[in-house]
Amino acid sequence: LAHIAAQDGRVHAFLEVTEQAALDAAAQVDAAVSNGTFDQMGPLAGVPVAFKDNLNLKGTHTTCSSRMLENYVSPYTATCVEDMLEAGGIPLGKLNMDEFAFGSSTETSAFGPTHNPWDLERVPGGSSGGSAAAVAAGMACVTLGSDTGGSIRQPASFCGIVGVKPTYGMVSRYGVVAFGSSLDQVGPFARSVEDAAFAMQAICKHDPRDCTSQQVETDFLGAIAQGAESVRGMRVGLVRAFMDAPGLAPEVRTKLEEAAHVLEDAGAEIVEVELPHANAAISAYYVLGPCEAFSNLARFDSVRYGYADPGHKDLGSQYEASRAAGFGMEAKRRILLGSYLLSAGVYDQYYYPAQQVRTLITQDYVQAFERCDAILAPASPRTAFKFGEISDPATMYLSDMFTISINIAGNGGMSVPCGLGEESGLPVGMQVISPAFKDENMFRVAAALE
Ligand code: GLN
């Protein structure tokens, strides 16, 4: 708490610090230590944790960094948050993000951006920028974020830490404010692969309150028990189209090649695989994502949730004025896009083909994973950029060119820090991608890269 008080004025990772809840939880751990019952506590006993502000924690604000939900107080706790607390985590508070998770820089937060702890003039990435910066600045050990197109992996790479997007269905979405329900997945940020494995063990559970939640037996700590040796005998795929992608910074490409050598030296076999439709992933995502967001954000109507503009006599003008004042620019852009794309006549031209592209991308991954156990790729095409440097939304959308296809196919992906770029001197993250529900595979590879 003292560290947050000292650091967060500059970083601005936290939107709310739950000081009393943290002290109460810590007192319980202290009591367990003194009466000899500490060993019966969960695997995260005493570990300071914090949560992206689209995850409900009873009694705290859940704003999604939007004016729309500025005064919304959660009446219940999300399953993933509950799992972290049941495992013994000490809740420090709620973390800044792009508004409703729309963005790649945390600049769209209605409450001001988060700064990258490596260079305060640069963005921490997004949308889970607060979750990444809090861990990178040592203000929390493990945080949770959400990833719809790259929002865990890209900020993890910008902040030089580990960030995991589990396979869709591994972590419950109950109590997570929905952006794109078929794409959203919660996962941890941590400073090491082992810390991330502890968190994954706590949150990867079947939850009957989320109908897409699956029952999967996992042992992340077992998977990485041999450290770098864990990768021996595995086949790791490289995608030529990713390596030659226009827009990939040379320093990131160099790191990718180095990472492949590290894996080879540790006993992995490198194979080339193809993802022929991955280049259509961004286009498909910016149809499917806004359509789902448009539908999910309809609930913020100023009656059931959110900001209500006062003094309107009829419901129509209250909706209009409240949504006009409550949502920021990027949220409005997504709502307008989604409403257009789903309208009669247009639907057949965009939404339907985007779903067909989704099937092709999913099949690409299935075929690629017949030839390898995991895929190595960049997490982000470049290192952290400066505030305001990318002002055109279409350019910002390219930030996720290497992460988005994984959400579309639903498999797992994680970002692992691989040192500093030779040109920028800033952290570079590599992405490891695993077949659906074989997330332990990417942990094995990550343990060798760390
Ligand atoms: N940057 C992407 C977007 O703006 C992904 C965001 C996310 O994963 N939540 O939609």
Image (cartoon, rainbow, N blue to C red):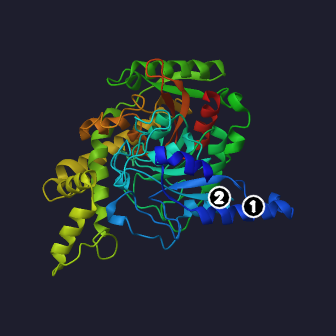
- Viewer-proximal residue, 347 or 154? 154
Percent x, y of residue 32? 80, 63
Give the residue type that dot 1 points to: Val
Please tell me which residue is depicted at 37% across the width and 37% down the height of the picture. 400
Q: Residue furthest bottom?
A: 313
**In the rendered view, would you say 271 is above or below 169?**
above
The residue under the point 67% across, 48% down is: 198
Residue for badge 2 = 90
Question: Whole-percent x and y of residue 222?
Answer: 72, 42
Q: Residues within 10 Å of mark 1 (few under 14, many from 20)?
A: many
Residue 165 visible in the displayed image: no
The Cα atoms of the two marked residues, 1 and 2, are separated by 9 Å
User: Label 1's element?
Assistant: helix
Which of the 4 quarters of the picture holds residue 177?
bottom left
Q: Is residue 173 left or right of residue 149?
A: right
Pointer 1 with pointer 2, Cβ within 8 A: yes
**Could you tell me which residue is drawn at 68 percent across and 28 percent down?**
228
Residue 246: where, in percent of width, then height?
32, 23
Binning the other alpha carbons within 10 Å of mark 2 as few (below 14), some (14 to 19) or many (20 upward) gives many
Q: Which residue is mark 1?
A: 29
